[in-house]
Amino acid sequence: MPEDACRLFLITPVIRDAAAFLPVFEAALEAGDAACVLLRQSAPDEGEAKKIIRALAAPAQQRGVACLIEEDPRLALHTELDGVHVEAGGEALDQALKQLKPQRIVGAGGLTTRDDAMGAGEAGVDYLMFGGPHTDETPDSIVERVAWWADIFNVPCVGYAHSLTEADALVQAGADFVAVCDALWSDPRGVEPVLKDLSEILAKTRQAAQ
């Protein structure tokens, strides 16, 4: 695979039952060329959160896929994850950078302005995500900001695709990674055909752009 090939960034649904989700998750890991997965969970306490995270992280890390969680650097350390994704700038991002860098990954999302994005990049994040399951940003806006960032800055950027049809535009705009969540897990066809289609879109679009 070319070094500059666009890769997949998988975002899980909010998981409450790791055992129920695990077969689908493992099928997705087998079917797609994922570079990273953002594990989202909703547990009643830290002990249960650790169980969910470890159950899902194991098959991903065994395949060389980086595993991140949202917002909690301490929990990432305690579960030996690869890092965190912070959906805000400011103090939360600063704390994550202090606690995890340079050994682990710190990514930033929820960046609603260009100033926010540049501030996160200057702070030392490993990637920026434009759009995401938490935001209502339009596909056109995400593509525009990916293109702006990729044209000027070296920090990798992730473009969030609400649907598979948006993936090609994100790759053409210069996204290093395309993130998917509901477009993958909610498709009635199942994860294997969705990821096959998505992988083909990424490969063809990148080749056409070269």
Image (cartoon, grey):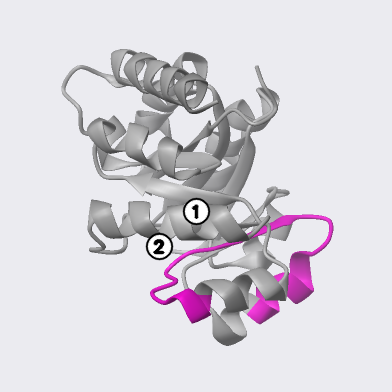
Picture residue at 51% right of the left edge, 19% below the top: 207
- Judging depth in this view, the residue of 75 and 159 nearest the camera is 159
Say whether residue 137 is left or right of residue 80.
Answer: left
Residue 98 in magenta stretch: yes
The quarter of the picture where residue 113 lies is bottom left
Residue at image mark 1: 48
At a point 66% along the width and 56% down the height, the residue shown is 155
Q: Which residue is mark 2?
A: 44
- Residue range of the region highlighted in magenta in the rendering: 94-116
Asked whether 148 or 136 is in front, the reply is: 148
State the SS at label 1. Answer: helix
Amino acid type shown at disc 1: Glu
Report x, y in % for residue 50. 57, 52
Q: Position of residue 176 (x, y in %)?
A: 56, 41
Residue shown at 65% from the left, 17% from the top: 1
Residue at image position (67%, 80%) is 94
The reply to whether the magenta stretch includes residue 140 is: no
When asked about the image quadrant of residue 91, the answer is bottom right
Q: Do residues under tags 1 and 2 come within 8 Å of each other at their CB atoms?
A: yes
Amino acid carrying label 2: it is: Pro
